[in-house]
Image (cartoon, grey):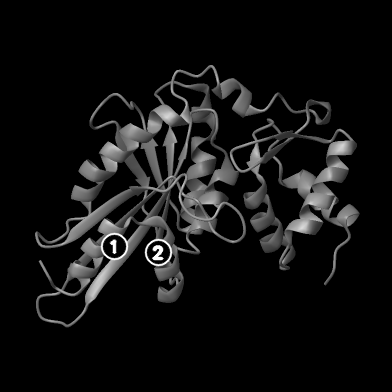
């Protein structure tokens, strides 16, 4: 099945949030491919996007891998990313609290054996920026060997971090797209108590459960126990060769050595 840019453009608009929340170009391509059951290449996608830009139907945000949003003339508000710039907790400030949680409470919750390893890596700026590669904000790689059975088990978790106003159901699809290279996908949402964004919580919870994506609510980034797991992820049957290639571009050489020693039973 082949699509013209004009035909593809008509499928983009319904997928954009009505409140003007921006969507990454790569996430939109994944959503279109799944909806249309046809791989959407970058050339036809950007041609369709440019048609909507010229008609004033959508707006664009440069940087952050490129985003588009429904223009205000279509009944939406200004893009949520614009409001984030004045937010007290932009994404860059949430990264350190999330890393502390992953290395602390989340790792403890995995209940790994004493001789296992768990590597937490900031991958928000690591690996290929385009193509089919995903860029989660963090990954956690755990490795443990069995007492009686041969071999080792390696689990790779990906985490997509969203600010209070930057999360939507499309964020679930972004976290889902990242599981093409990991075993477990998680959406981490900074959602304080009493915020207006709580109105979206039930819908996002349902989408996470439907797609097997974990949902972690970060209530208070300044608190050591400010994160709560609302939805547990479902393990994906991602190919080992795919995960190997993903880790090759995400982990440091030192981390790779630690992982090799752990899977081979070396100290």
At which x and y percent is residue 242? 46, 71
Residue 238: quarter of image: bottom left
Residue designated by label 1: 256
Residue 110 visible in the current orientation? yes
Crowdedness near tag 1: few (<14), some (14–19) or many (≥20) residues, C-alpha within 10 Å: some
User: Which type of secondary structure does the marked residue at label 2 adopt?
Assistant: helix
Give the total number of marks visible in the rendering.
2
* Residue 185 drawn above or below residue 264: above
At which x and y percent is residue 180? 50, 64
Question: Horizontally, is 100 left or right of 250 in the view?
Answer: left
> Residue 154 or 132: which is nearer the viewer?
132
In percent of the image, x 79 and y 28: which residue is there? 75
In percent of the image, x 10 and y 62: which residue is there? 115
At which x and y percent is residue 49? 80, 46
User: Which type of secondary structure does the marked residue at label 1 adopt?
Assistant: helix
In percent of the image, x 44 and y 36: which residue is there? 189
In percent of the image, x 84 and y 38: which residue is there? 53
Residue designated by label 2: 248
Crowdedness near tag 2: few (<14), some (14–19) or many (≥20) residues, C-alpha within 10 Å: few
Between the residue at mark 1 and the residue at mark 2, the CA separation in whole angstroms equals 8 Å
Cβ atoms at labels 1 and 2 below 8 Å apart:
yes
């Amino acid at each position: 099945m082949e699509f013209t840019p004009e035909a593809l453009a008509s499928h983009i608009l319904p997928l954009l949030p009505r409140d003007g929340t921006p969507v990454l170009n790569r996430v939109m391509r994944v959503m279109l491919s799944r909806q249309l059951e046809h791989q959407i290449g970058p050339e036809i996608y950007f041609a369709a996007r440019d048609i909507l830009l010229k008609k004033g139907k959508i707006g664009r945000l440069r940087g952050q891998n490129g985003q588009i949003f429904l223009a205000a003339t279509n009944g939406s508000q200004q893009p949520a990313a614009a409001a984030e710039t004045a937010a007290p907790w932009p994404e860059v400030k949430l990264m350190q609290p999330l890393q502390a949680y992953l290395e602390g409470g989340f790792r403890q919750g995995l209940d790994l054996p004493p001789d296992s390893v768990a590597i937490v890596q900031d991958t928000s700026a690591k690996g290929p920026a385009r193509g089919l590669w995903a860029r989660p904000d963090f990954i956690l790689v755990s490795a443990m060997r069995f007492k009686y059975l041969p071999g080792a088990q390696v689990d790779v978790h990906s985490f997509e971090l969203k600010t209070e106003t930057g999360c939507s159901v499309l964020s679930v699809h972004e976290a889902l797209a990242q599981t093409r290279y990991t075993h477990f996908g998680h959406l981490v949402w900074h959602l304080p108590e009493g915020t207006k964004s709580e109105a979206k919580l039930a819908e996002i919870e349902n989408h996470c459960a439907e797609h097997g994506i974990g949902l972690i609510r970060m209530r208070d980034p300044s608190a050591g126990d400010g994160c709560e797991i609302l939805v547990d992820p479902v393990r994906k049957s991602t190919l080992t060769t795919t995960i190997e290639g993903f880790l090759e571009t995400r982990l440091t050489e030192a981390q790779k050595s630690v992982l090799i020693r752990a899977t081979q039973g070396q100290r």
